[in-house]
Image (spheres, rainbow, N blue to C red):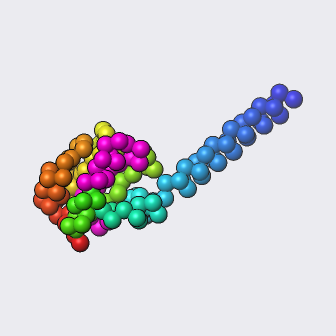
Amino acid sequence: MKNITLSIIILTVVIFGLILAYSNSQSNPSTNDGTTETTVANQDKIYFDDSSPVMYFWIPLCTWCQKEEVILNIIAKDGFRVKSMNVYEDNTLYDKYGIEGTPSFIAENGEKLIGYQEEVTLRDWLEKQGAKIK
């Protein structure tokens, strides 16, 4: 009887683990190259563009990220774009890119801009990185 009970417990734990693993794989859609796909929520933000040479690491509920969104909307009118890297949706991005906080920007050349940026600073840096694409 003890063996049957132990077997049922082990089977339950294994099934729960499989369900959890499947659930996590569905909540973080990714392309074959490991980058996170643009979500429907991101599509209404005019400053997001997957072809941008600058990745923007952010979290929806981050106060500084919300303030940065205002700046991004202003400079987007002049064609500046960033690639959305929502670390809330995919927290593996922290380790993968060495992100210590949000908001953060990383260019293709590895140059970083950490923390909230005023309009002039961000505009100049994005221009230098070639993120004026539209």
Residue 89 placement, left or right of 12: left
Would you identify the image quadrant in which residue 103 lies? top left
- The quarter of the rendered structure image containing the N terminus is top right
Would you identify the image quadrant in which residue 47 lies? bottom left
Residue lying at the far top of the rendered structure? 2
Q: Point out the stretch of residues depicted in magenta.
A: 49-71
Residue 115 placement, left or right of 61: left
- Image point 61% across, 46% down: which residue? 20
- Image point 30% across, 38% down: which residue? 100
Magenta stretch holds residue 96: no
Count of marks, rendered view? 0
Residue 8 placement, left or right of 25: right
Position of residue 24 relative to residue 32, above or below, is above
Residue 76 lies, in percent from the top left, at 25, 63
Residue 21 placement, left or right of 14: left
Residue 128 lies, in percent from the top left, at 12, 59
Residue lying at the far bottom of the rendered structure? 134
- Image point 73% across, 40% down: which residue? 11
Residue lying at the far right of the rendered structure? 1
Residue 68 lies, in percent from the top left, at 28, 49
Can residue 82 be seen?
no
Residue 60 lies, in percent from the top left, at 41, 48
- Image point 75% across, 34% down: which residue? 9
Can residue 24 be seen?
yes
- The quarter of the rendered structure image containing the C terminus is bottom left
